[in-house]
Image (spheres, rainbow, N blue to C red):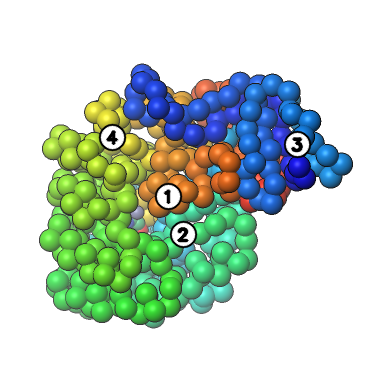
Amino acid sequence: MNTDLVIYNIGQLVTGRELEIENNSCMENIEIIENGYLVVRDGKIVTVGSGEIPSKYVNLTTKLIDCEGRVVTPGLIDSHTHLVHGGSREHEFSKKIQGVPYLEILKSGGGILSTVKSTKEATEDELLKKAKKSLGVMLSLGVTTVESKSGYGLDLETELKQLRVNERLNHEQEVEIISTFMAAHATPPEYNGDSEKFIDDVIKMLPIIKENKLAKFCDIFCEEGVFSKAQSKKLLLEGKKYGLKPRIHADEIENTEGAQLAVEIGAYSADHLMAISNEGIEVLKNSKTIANLLPGTSFNLGKEYAPARKMIDSGVQVALSTDYNPGSCPSENLQLVMQIAASKLRMRPLEIFKAVTINAAKALDKEKEIGSLEEGKNADIVIFDAENIDYILYHFGINHTKKVFKNGCLVFKK
Ligand code: IZC
Ligand code: ZN
């Protein structure tokens, strides 16, 4: 058989394949192969295994990579970011450190609204250049797929500008972008607080987003004083009519039963959940909705963390993402988020790798193509300069990536 690439002598090969076994927790059920190898052809995984590589997979044109006992995992997936934006908000950082709440900064015209101003002022090319720079950082950290939301336009023209940047990014650099329409991020000041009128105007944008095929998902900031549960339901159900799959910023600062709404409307993910209730956990655990946790945000805002342990021990499936944005989490570093998940969310190594691979793929409705190294799936692969996965989480604050492959091609090398 003609093959393009064989990676062998892998100390730990985390395939991300879900196993039908009873384990310590509902999230430690992913396959990990000791002394593994991996075979790639035409950008797809042919097979994985342990020990000697069967000779049929090696021929004259096969590129062979000796891993020298290192860790290999699926390309990491960052399933929640606000990647495309103008400006930055370090001018608000000192206020935050002194304890001024996030929502108070927003109410006084800063926060999200400050980034809306900068994003309106920026040209499409400027937004593209800035986002590309961030994606370069993400790729170097082993991230091969990124979800990217609009929501710094709040008017049709600027929302479309952000979404067009997402589309161009897919042609102009290696990381795959999954696009989300999120005009319902804050009510613009000219509405004088009439969020109901604004939601109706966002609903009017839906046919145009669909017509231009610019987004896969629709999202909303369901939060006390931002958009209510009823408004969120109204928008996300309308979005569904236009083929936009729902996801939701839920129970981030106050509990507004966002998790329950996510399950009710069949959202692919309920994101944040720092303020989730016990009832919310009960509802999530019996659903297909992924609990997408963003502990980099808690870290940056000095806030409490989502009750990940309680969720996982109850049977909830969790993903982890950066939430990269200029306000509540100005960091592209998913590896750091994984390390915070270990120390602050008390998540275990296999749970953490499941959260940034197959569960993140499910949160993006992409699990048939990415998120695990299984026959026929995309050859998105990371080689880490570590002998075992525990080390990657334990030795924190540095980048452990050695090589990254996207669709079988080497796209980053240290
Ligand atoms: O720009 O502050 N939480 N939206 C909801 C954000 C954080 C992003 C921002
Ligand atoms: Zn967000």
Q: Secondary structure at mark 1?
A: loop
Q: Disc 1 marks which amino acid?
A: Ser
Residue 221 in the figure: left or right of residue 81: left
Q: Secondary structure at mark 2?
A: strand
Frontmost of labels 3 and 4 is: 3
Q: CA distance from mark 3 to mark 2?
A: 33 Å
Check if mark 3's residue and mark 1's residue have beta carbons within 8 Å: no
Residue named by callout 1 = 79
The residue shown at (40%, 64%) is: 216
Check if mark 2's residue and mark 1's residue have beta carbons within 8 Å: yes
Residue 374 visible? The answer is yes
Q: Disc 4 marks which amino acid?
A: Val
Residue 171 position, x and y percent, is 60, 67
Check if mark 4's residue and mark 1's residue have beta carbons within 8 Å: no
The residue shown at (30%, 71%) is: 242
Q: CA distance from mark 4 to mark 1?
A: 17 Å
Q: CA distance from mark 2 to mark 1?
A: 8 Å
The residue shown at (18%, 40%) is: 283
Q: Disc 2 marks which amino acid?
A: Ile
Q: Disc 3 marks which amino acid?
A: Tyr
| Disc 2 packing (10 Å; few <14; some 14–19; many ≥20) | many
Q: CA distance from mark 3 to mark 4?
A: 39 Å
Q: Quadrant of the C terminus?
A: top right
